[in-house]
Amino acid sequence: MPLNTLLRRHALYRPDHTALIFDDTAITWSELDARVDRVVAALASRGLGRGDRVATMLDNGVEIIELYQAVARAGFVAVPLSPLLRGDGLVNLLVDSGARVLITMHRLVGAVDQVRDRVPSVPDDGYLLVDGEASGYRDYHQLVATAGPGRWESVPPGRDDPFDIVYSSGTTGLPKGIVHTHEIREAYATGFTASYRIHPESIILHSGSLVFNGAFLTLMPWFYLGCTFVLMPSFDPAGVVDAVDRYGVTHMLVVPSQVIALLATEGFDGGRCATLEMLCSLGAPLHLEHKQELDRRLPGRFYELYGLTEGFVTILDRDDFPRKPGSVGVPPPLYEMRIVDDEGVDLPTGEVGEIVGRGPITTPGYWNRPGLTAEAIKDGWLYSGDLGYVDDDGFLYLVDRKKDLIISGGVNVYPRDIEEVIVQHPDVVDVAVFGVDDVRWGETPIAAVRLRQGTTTDPAELREWINNRVSRFQKVREVEVRIEFPLSVAGKTLRRVLKSDYLEAHS
């Protein structure tokens, strides 16, 4: 099994090569191999074996990396949970996954203690802390240190075995666990290595949350090739520039909110970031204005990925960006894509419809949710819920989420079209448009904006500027200035929270 053999291979053939850098501490492949043996032994001492779920509620750290490696070796199933989870949201996911262990942090003890008696699958001694001690919790590092060295020689996991369950339901709501098998993670390893031109000498920087499935886009190529992974505790734009400069980083992933922060950071240019070979934006559409500015700063490095955790992607390659800047690229080799109407019938070039696709990373389904699986995956095709069209060359152009579509006066209005206009205003840093009910039009757009520091643009004047540049049905009713946008743990703007806040303020 490739995943089961990779860590051992790197420890044998490049033992002294730096595998991981975290908090200025470097760990070699041989050191990581020995450490993962202890982690496996420690979890096995708690009675865990192949197929048992191990949940984490952790900030970025070496422990999550170790767990993913232990999963590959021994067949545990990782359940990475957001540290933002609380109450019913946390209970739902722990119960749904059937987790037998929860590895967490001291600052979350209070939140976990409030729900422990509602999670029967985790025994009293199944709660582990990575940073200190608390009543009712085992010390993770002590458990690992005392587990003793030794090789794990159990039957390795099969290719169809679950590697992880990634929940996409946010911090509240019904759980929807997306299953990734070992075979799927193998496809991440080989496919994205090729797509991103990653090589054994690459130095990959990751500053976003490891809970976010997008982390695997470079985490698995790192694991596959045995190169170097630089992990930051959290995203900090100045820290990212410093890390790129200090370690000679070649590859990194960012979400749009992070791109915006980096563009406002001194040194984010071809001087201190000269070693970068790839910078990929993912997680949400990046406005064309920001794409073009990024390419001006760091020409020839920009990639964009459109994708779903459920397992379909398109990639805009660095070499295609100059001629297709508004596109999100094409499916990689071994992937297929269609654009269909509401009846599932293929649409011709240029017509907007739902994006459906399939490929080697498509999930076998949602954990314990056969009904939801049947709704999302039909005849092997994953229905994205996103709207888009393809041009004459087959490049995909993302229009919007189906659920974010605004119908104003009977006309389909796509928030992203309005956002692309608003972001061109010199005082606007970021924007999110959403629809609210309107007596006359049915729905009408509202624009939430973040302004550049020091600007005093009047919202009414900005509204007039926008409405002079959009069509009749795209005119915004109001511009709401926000100091910051609500973000998910992955750094995505939560448009639904902006809408909820607006409605509450105007109720």
Image (tube, grey):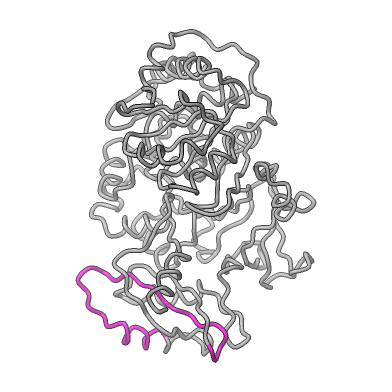
Say which residue appears at 49% left-offset and 48% top-offset. Answer: 88
Q: Is residue 458 shown above or below 268?
A: below
Q: Is residue 64 shown above or below 144?
A: below
Answer whether residue 9 is visible to the viewer in this image.
no
Asked where in the image residue 346 lies, by quadrant, the reply is bottom right
In-image side of 83 versus 94 (left or right): left
Quadrant in which the N terminus is drawn: top right
Residue 60 on the magenta segment: no
Q: Position of residue 117 (x, y in %)?
A: 48, 36
Answer whether residue 276 is visible to the viewer in this image.
yes
Residue 460 on the magenta segment: yes
Quadrant in which the C terminus is drawn: bottom left
Say which residue appears at 43% left-offset and 77% top-offset. Answer: 421
For the residue pair 152 and 332, the one nearer the viewer reads as: 152
For the residue pair 501 and 423, the one nearer the viewer reads as: 501
Q: Position of residue 153 (x, y in %)?
A: 59, 11
Say which residue appears at 70% left-offset and 42% top-offset. Answer: 364
**What residue range appears in magenta?**
439-466
How many numbered marks are there?
Answer: 0
